[in-house]
């Protein structure tokens, strides 16, 4: 899980939200995102799913806070070097 402190809190369901907690994505989240067209819409959908809030609430985020959430999303989806502990053959 990744917590994101919002620099510009939003109001959701009548309460102030000053932090988003994004859970790690599962394959079903990736499948759902794959069905959405447009890169921005994909990010909104995935952030909403991982934070367990409505997409319209994600759309209310300040651009700076959205960028932080998108960066966290990118970190989840980043493909890095193998982590098997075995040295790579070069």
Image (tube, rainbow, N blue to C red):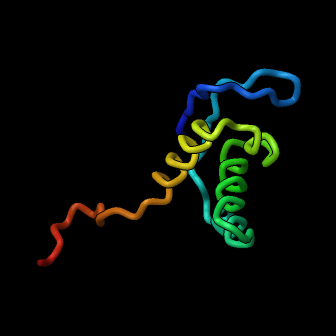
| Image quarter (top left, top right, bottom left or bottom right) of the C terminus | bottom left
Q: How far from the left and from the top, in percent, is residue 78?
A: 43, 60
Q: Is residue 38 above or below residue 64?
A: below
Residue at 30% from the left image edge and 61% from the top image edge: 83
* Residue 35 vs residue 67, the one in the foreground: 67
Left or right: residue 81 versus residue 77 is: left
Q: How far from the left and from the top, in percent, is residue 64?
A: 57, 37
* Residue 82 vs residue 32, the one in the foreground: 32
Residue at 56% from the left image edge and 33% from the top image edge: 4
Left or right: residue 13 versus residue 73 is: right
Residue at 82% from the left image edge and 45% from the top image edge: 56
Q: Farthest right residue?
A: 14
Q: Is residue 61 above or below residue 14?
A: below
Left or right: residue 48 versus residue 26 is: right
Q: Quadrant of residue 35?
A: bottom right
Q: Is residue 1 above or below residue 76?
A: above
| Image quarter (top left, top right, bottom left or bottom right) of the N terminus | top right
* Residue 29 vs residue 61, the one in the foreground: 61
């Amino acid at each position: 899980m990744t917590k994101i402190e919002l620099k510009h809190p939003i109001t959701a369901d009548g309460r102030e939200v000053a932090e988003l907690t994004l859970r790690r994505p599962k394959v079903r989240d990736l499948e759902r995102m794959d069905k959405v067209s447009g890169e921005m819409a994909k990010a909104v959908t995935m952030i909403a799913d991982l934070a367990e809030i409505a997409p319209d609430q994600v759309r209310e985020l300040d651009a700076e806070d959205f960028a932080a959430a998108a960066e966290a999303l990118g970190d989840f989806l980043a493909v890095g070097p193998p982590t098997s502990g075995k040295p790579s053959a070069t």
